Amino acid sequence: MAEQVVADLRERCATPVSLLRDVAVEMADEMRAGLEKEGGSRVKMLLSYVDKLPTGREEGLFYGLDLGGTNFRVLKVQLGGNDQRIANRESRAVAIPPHLMSGSSSELFGFIASELAKFVADENKGNSFSSGKKRELGFTFSFPVRQHSIASGTLVKWTKAFCIEDAVGEDVVVKLQTAMKKQGVDIHVAALINDAVGTLAGARYYDEDVIAGVIFGTGTNAAYVEKANAIPKWEGDLPESGDMVINMEWGNFYSCHLPVTEYDQALDKESLNPGEQIYEKLTSGMYLGEIVRRVLLKLSVQTAIFGEIDHTKLKTHFHLRTPHTSAMHHDETPDLKIVEEKLEETLGISGTSLETRKMVVEIIDIIARRAARLAAAGLAGILKKLGRDGSIDKRRSVLVIDGGLFEHYAKFSKCLETTLSELVGEELSKSVVVKHADEGPGIGAALIAASHSQYRNVEGNPDVKD
Ligand code: ADP
Ligand code: MG
């Protein structure tokens, strides 16, 4: 009976290479449709207005702010040009007090500006940072924003734990700049980006072969460099560089080839955003543990595999988190001691047999492998769209990935990498490189502020506009 539930799951979650290839083709097709016209695809393909990625030649002092999940980060970098790159850096992480996540926007931005003010005040205490004339800042804001220019954009909706009604539809840069003025912080916000774009910029600064920045954390997203003349929906003048970074918002990708099970359907139906973000629900950290919990619950109710247990915890949505399932997945003790402990601690399931624990690990493996293989298919889709799948462009392609899931879940990241090699083939896999981001998105934002600086040219000399 229990074996049957697992066998069904294995079958329904299967991701043979043929299926992954179909997914990659559809990802590339959706990318094209989203670039064609506004609303052309579920994959929004938003213009980031970032048309100059950092080159390494930038000079001067730049600030970054990173607002994503529960922390935010204030940082500054002293850029020393080609030889020195980041000559000096400093950063500070600050926890956002939970009550500010659902208060008013003036409270939230007031708090951010006051932390920035403190950070700036500290630099005047005689450290080694040399400041230029007018200071500039890049703002990483990882919520859906409709961008109007490199440094303006209105909030479409909040996600994660944030819910501040009066900010929706407002320009978040205006909000930030107003709050900074109140605090007496004289820094110009030169760029507004999200974490995928920041990851791309932070990596491109060191390596010009970087073509995409991808996040696998609580959620998932990707940004990549597109030719501006391949964006039919772009209406302005073509940028001088000929390039435009596209914020894909690929978490909302859907294809009929995606191996969606009854567990995924129920999860989606009961989620805060039913019908949306289906690719994200199959591949990101917020959901992997939750899918496993749903399978374990069915197993327990239908087959009593865990004996007579209290189902309260096993029935609680999101009670089993991905770091828990990841710890169980990596258990290398001969009798699966860690699995035993985690089942007891998190779900109140005790006295399991080794056989049962092995079955739990197999379920976790099925869900994590499906996620990693679909993630690889998404990356293959980007390569295909750019003709870098061996068809046209044979240059080295570096895909940079950041986010807690990729960073901490070794079996996930390993499987993603081997699957991508499998998809692109042995020959091409020599020139397709997947790597973990060296720099966080906040640094990337500071670097984009530098490459889009209004006050300096790229060599850092005061510009005529100053
Ligand atoms: P965010 O996406 O909110 O910016 P992170 O990139 O730090 O944050 O990713 C956090 C997510 O990473 C968590 O929600 C969790 O799903 C996943 N994660 C964190 N630690 C681990 C771990 N040890 N094993 C597996 N997944 C993890
Ligand atoms: Mg993040």
Image: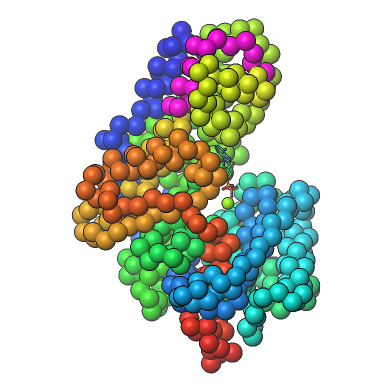
Residue name at image x 46 percent, y 32 percent: 368
Q: What span is colored magenta in the figure? A: 348-366
Kindly report the secondary structure that dominates the magenta region of the rendered protein.
Answer: helix
Residue at the image point whose x is 63% and y is 83% from the top: 132
Q: Position of residue 182 (x, y in %)?
A: 79, 73
Q: Nearer the viewer, residue 381 or 135?
A: 135
Image x and y of residue 364, in percent: 49, 26
Residue 232 in view (yes/no): no
Relative placement, left or right, of 383 versus 63 is left
Q: Is residue 67 left or right of residue 242?
A: right
List x then y, in percent, for residue 397: 33, 57
The front one of 176 and 37 is 176
The percent coordinates of residue 250 (x first, y second) are 45, 49
Residue that appears at 50% across and 57% down: 438
In the image, residue 14 above or below residue 185: above
Who's the residue at 39% across and 37% down the image? Answer: 415
